[in-house]
Image: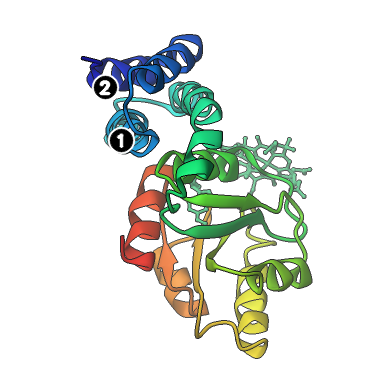
Amino acid sequence: MFDLKTLSEYLQKGDAKKVGELTAQALAEGLSPKTILSEGLIAGMDIVGAKFKKNELFVPEVLIAARAMHAGLDVLKPKLAETGAKPAGRIVIGTVKGDLHDIGKNLVKMMLQGAGFDVRDLGIDVTTDKFVAAAGEEGVQIVAMSALLSTTMPQMRIIIEALHKAGLLSKIKTMVGGAPISQKYATEIGADGFAPDAASAVDKARQLVGV
Ligand code: B1M
């Protein structure tokens, strides 16, 4: 009987090759893609996220674990599509206009994907129009914005106002983060959620979509 705990442990160690192989083996042994995802890959990434929050793991280790997660996801993706397993939710994410920092945003994206969210990455230096257009696409539940500069964080308020004007805030939630952002600032600009780090971003996104 395939042991999903072993898969989770290799993911936590960041062994991408082994995670890919074990994911394929689990499929070959008849486990469902959904079970492998939730009890192997996501379970492992949840532990990584919890350790990151407690400062027991640091950014490089999280990125390596996230890469391993992707190796497993690459094997599972076609099978998940076949079985019609629903993603935890659909999110668009980007670094706001004028801001080129993307390491934290990428980490947040990978952790969200690791938690089973379908994430569309708009990249860096993303204009308000691009955020609004992406937010209006079918099924989007959260618009996630990252900013690392005190000069670019006001873009978040502009984007939230534009989403409001476009009539989208009745169907989507907004989430903000990045080194200069605080809960106080998030509340002030009317964001629905704030997360101080990538692991908390997963908790917040789950809370916002109610999963
Ligand atoms: Co820049 N930079 N930088 N920089 N840079 C900072 C941010 C700075 C604090 C350095 C400093 O002065 N001490 C400072 C900003 C000061 C301020 O405004 N408060 C600064 C500056 C001034 C600049 C330039 C203006 C420098 C210049 O050209 N004079 C320039 C601006 C360019 C631009 O964006 N237009 C610039 C350029 C760059 C590089 C291109 C060289 C490079 C970016 C490379 C890249 O991202 N691909 C860079 C880097 C690397 C940094 C530092 C050193 C590291 C940032 C980082 O990646 N941290 C940074 C100083 C520092 O933070 N020590 C600095 C690691 C990352 C994992 O953390 O991004 O905070 P972070 O993400 C965290 C959380 O914030 C959170 O989760 C992540 C993981 O836990 N999070 C979210 C992030 N987004 C989230 C979204 C969420 C939720 C959580 O929900 C949606």
Coordinates of residue 92 in the picture (x, y in percent): 60, 59
Which secondary structure, mark 2? helix
The numbered disc on residue 4 is 2
- Seen from the viewer's position, the closer of residues 27 and 129 is 27
- Seen from the viewer's position, the closer of residues 131 and 193 is 131
The CA span between labels 1 and 2 is 9 Å
Q: Is residue 146 visible?
A: no
Q: Is mark 2 within 8 Å of ligand 1?
A: no
Q: As shown in the figure, which amino acid type bears the numbered disc 2?
A: Leu
- Seen from the viewer's position, the closer of residues 75 and 116 is 75
Which secondary structure, mark 1? helix
Please state if 3 lies on the left or on the right of 36 as rendered: left
Quarter of the image for residue 184 reads bottom left
Crowd tier of the residue under label 2, counting other residues whose Cα lies within 10 Å: few below 14, some 14–19, many 20 or above = many
User: Measuring 51% from the left and 42% from the top, which residue is drawn there?
Assistant: 82
Is 181 situated above or below 4?
below
Q: As shown in the figure, which amino acid type bears the numbered disc 1?
A: Thr
Coordinates of residue 27 in the picture (x, y in percent): 40, 23
Quarter of the image for residue 37 reads top left
